[in-house]
Image (spheres, helix red, strand yellow):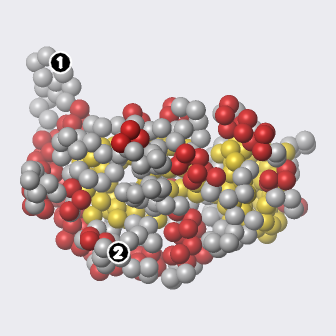
Amino acid sequence: MKPLAKILGGAVTALLISTSALAQDIAVRGEQVWTMGPQGVIADGVVVIEDGRITAVGPYADTPIPTDMTVLSAPVVTPGLVDAHSTVGLTGYLNQPDDQDQLDDSAPVQPQLRAIDAYNPHDRLVQWVRELGVTTLHTGHGPGALVSGQTMVVKTRGNTVEAALVEDGTMIAANLGTWSLDRSGSPGTRAKQMSMLRQALVAAQSPVEGEDDDEDGARDLVNEAFVSVIRGETPLLVTANRSQDIQSALRLAEEFGIEVVIDGAADAHLMLDELAASGVSVILHPTMARNDGEMENVAFTTPAALAGAGIPFALQSGYEAYVPKTRVVLWEAGFAAGYGLSPEQALASVTIDAANIIGMGDRIGSLEVGKDGDVALFDGDPLEYTSHAVGVVIEGEVVSDAVR
């Protein structure tokens, strides 16, 4: 089979990316097609995409391909990768003040800040992760404040944020522990962090009917955001690494009956029973995160421990305070596979499991009929460091043929 780079010239691909061409009718053939769905791994398989959606998946010999449809080929084909939590698009690759929009530290609680207002689809990091097979980002405001803002789901393409957008206001990002403490202000302690969160949720629990607006008709955007959490419309994404902070997040979920997703969770392997009993999902820190400070208990074997305990989890690129500002989830998954995860579990943590946790499992994360035509092509085992991404398709549009 010819690699994708041999089928499409670089000039053609550049045109597709710069013009955000409409979805193509296209088929993608692989010596191995890892569907991450009920069909498992298909030897010599093919994925047929029409009008941006998958219309057929199966063995090449038995799956009809419309006449004259372009067929791309690669040794290994997988679903487009899903980054379960990122700040890509808000943290620019230059690491300069003018391209760092993941945090506003003017107040400790700002759930009204929308990721859509800060996302830059032209930032080099968006292109970088796309070329490595990442087709979907759950991105938004990062750590550093008690409630730093909202997240959203985007595809890694598009000339505008509207063209990239899948869902606005996916979760509200909260942060417990030292990252969001202000020793000279508020909150200055963990107890004050929890008190402030409780106060905001209590205020949202019982809004006075007919008095949602003040006398001037102004909306309370902060309270509106917390009301959506209380109503079960928006999960609270709580970054908590130490066990005491994870426990506080679980207690908050039980107390208010809200959906909480635990993020980071460096100490997760120390409290598997509690996490399993709570029923929460975990977006685990990058496997290779630096183990200092709140991350001192990071373990390479934590993904396997979560899988063994039956706790739903996904891997993420997370937030980095230094250049190049992000990690690549495929490499994190590959490392986890070397420490106890099976290849299927590792790939699931950055495809279907990630999609399910961010509420997108009915649309992305696996190669199944009816889902978005998001496909990544590799010249070998995608979990091996020596393999390369050789092509990326988003909703039937070839967005990269770079060999990365």
Q: What amino acid is labelled 1 in the image? A: Gly
CA–CA distance in space, label 1 to label 2: 49 Å
Check residue 180 in the rendering and tell me which mark sits there, or answer none.
none
Specify the farthest residue to the right. 67
Task: Name the residue carrying label 1.
Answer: 217
Where disc 2 sits, the SS reads loop
Mark found first going from the N terminus, 1 or 2: 1
Give the quadrant of the C terminus: bottom right
> What is the residue that sits farthest to the top in this orientation?
216
* Residue found 14% across the figure and 35% down from its top: 207
> Picture coordinates of residue 383 (x, y %)?
62, 71
Q: Work out whether residue 129 or residue 76 is closer to the camera in this orientation and state it.
A: 129
| Residue 236 against residue 331 in the figure, above or below | above
Q: Nearer the viewer, residue 222 or 145?
A: 145
Classed neighbour count for the residue bearing mark 2: other residues with Cα under 10 Å, few (<14), some (14–19), many (≥20): few
Looking at the figure, which quarter contains the N terminus?
A: bottom right
Image quarter for residue 342? bottom right
Residue lying at 85% horizontally and 53% vertically, measured from the top left? 6
> Looking at the image, which is closer to me, 354 or 183?
183
Q: Quadrant of residue 338?
A: bottom right
Question: At 20% across and 63% down in the image, what residue appears?
Answer: 177
Which x, y percent locates residue 307? 45, 76
- 328 horizontally vs 312: left or right: right
The residue positioned 14% from the left and 54% from the top of the image is 182
Question: Is residue 195 among what the camera can see?
Answer: no
User: Given this view, does label 1 or label 2 mark the residue nearer the observer?
Assistant: 2
Image position of 225 with respect to 60: above or below: above
Q: How many marks?
A: 2
Q: Which residue is mark 2?
A: 291
53 to 340, vertically: above or below: above
Q: Is residue 280 left or right of residue 286?
A: left
Three-letter code, disc 2:
Asn
